[in-house]
Image (cartoon, rainbow, N blue to C red):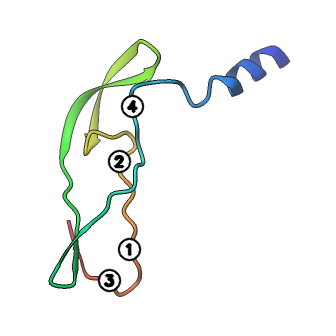
Amino acid sequence: MDAMHEAGIKAFPAKTAGKGNQLLEPKIVKGVKVYDITASVIQWETAPGQKVEAWTYNEQVPGPTIRVKEGDRVRL
């Protein structure tokens, strides 16, 4: 059991082609933070060599990180 647990820890995160949860930088247009978001379906590599169909935002699973502060004007 300990060996299985250790193997699981060493395998995380899996060495896959995908990159998710990347910071999305906005464009500033007249004081408004503008984020370009696109939804699409891709073949997502969940483990090395294993792919499944997944809905994504900006081809990321999980989707990109958007950071704003209270009072910011935002457009997606």
Q: Which residue is mark 2?
A: 63
User: Residue 69 at x, y = what percent?
Assistant: 41, 79
Q: Is disc 2 surrounded by few (<14), some (14 to 19) or many (20+) residues within 10 Å?
A: many
Q: Residue at x 26, y 36 (%)?
A: 55
Disc 1, SS: loop
Q: Which residue is mark 3?
A: 72
Which callout, 2 or 1, points at the residue further toward the start of the chain?
2
What distance separates the C-alpha of mark 3 from that of mark 4? 30 Å
Q: Amino acid at mark 2?
A: Gly
Judged left or right of residue 59, residue 66 is: right
Q: Is residue 43 above or below residue 65?
A: above
Q: CA distance from mark 2 to mark 1?
A: 16 Å
Residue contact at pointers 1 and 3, CB within 8 angstroms: yes
Assign the C terminus to one quadrant of the image: bottom left
Query: Where in the figure is residue 39, as x and y percent of width and height?
Result: 19, 45
Check disc 4 and give the amino acid type: Gly
Residue at (38% x, 74% y) in the render = 68
Distance from label 1 to label 3 (Cα)?
A: 6 Å
Query: Mark 1 sits on what residue?
Result: 68
Residue 12 in the image: x percent, y percent?
A: 61, 29
- Residue carrying label 4: 18
In the shown orientation, is residue 28 left or right of residue 47?
Answer: left
Query: In which quadrant of the rendered view does residue 44 lie?
Result: top left
